[in-house]
Amino acid sequence: CRLPDCDCVWTDWIDVSYPNASDKNGGDYETFENILKKNSSWVCAKAENISCRAQKFPNTSIADLGQKVECDVNVGLICNNKDQQIGGIIPMPVCLNYEISICCTPNKPECLPTPSTTSTSTSTPSSTTSSVSTTTTSTTAPTPTAEVPPSSTTPPPFPTTTTTT
């Protein structure tokens, strides 16, 4: 159940990077990191969705532009000049200038997920580390021992679980 005031809100179109046609190792990098470098007051508590488009072709889907572009809700947009080929609407092997819009969760405590701790037990050998928000959970099971003959009264080992937050 979501609070009505916690629905994500779309930003205006953001364009903080411009591809340099003479730099084969350059490209267009509309990443969250670059947005923060250009505007330190920019806040997106949690990016829930992203929309990417070429600035000169706003009504053409990036899939139809014929360029290799990464449009990722966790990173932003990445386009490398070295990955581009001439063809279609692309006169040179250079990234077009892209812009992005991000749907951000409002930066309010009631809208942001609270860190939680989970633990898991298992009887097979494994080592797992996962990260949820600022919580890390590690589960380690003991190494199996040889089977005990039926005449023995020694109980089997119990799995151990260690949780760190």
Image: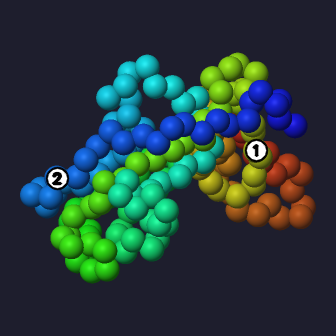
Q: How has the structure been colored for display? A: rainbow
Image vertical order of residue 142 relative to residue 67, above or below: above
Q: Which mark is residue 20?
A: 2
User: Label 1 is placed on what type of residue?
Assistant: Thr
Q: Which mark is residue 53?
A: none
Q: Where is residue 17 in the image (x, y as percent from the top left)?
A: 29, 43
How many numbered dots are placed on residues in this image?
2
SS of the residue at dot 1? loop
Give the image quarter of residue 123: bottom right
Q: Position of residue 21 (x, y in %)?
A: 15, 58
Q: In which quarter of the image is the N terminus?
A: top right
Q: Residue at x 70, y 62 (%)?
A: 146
Is any part of residue 101 visible from this angle?
yes
Quickly name the residue at label 1: 120
Closest to the observer, 24 or 87: 87
Image vertical order of residue 25 relative to residue 83, above or below: above
Q: Residue at x 27, y 80 (%)?
A: 87
Disc 1: CA contacts within 10 A as few (<14), some (14-19) or many (>=20):
some
How far apart are the two marked residues, 1 and 2, measured between alpha carbons?
A: 50 Å
SS of the residue at dot 2? loop
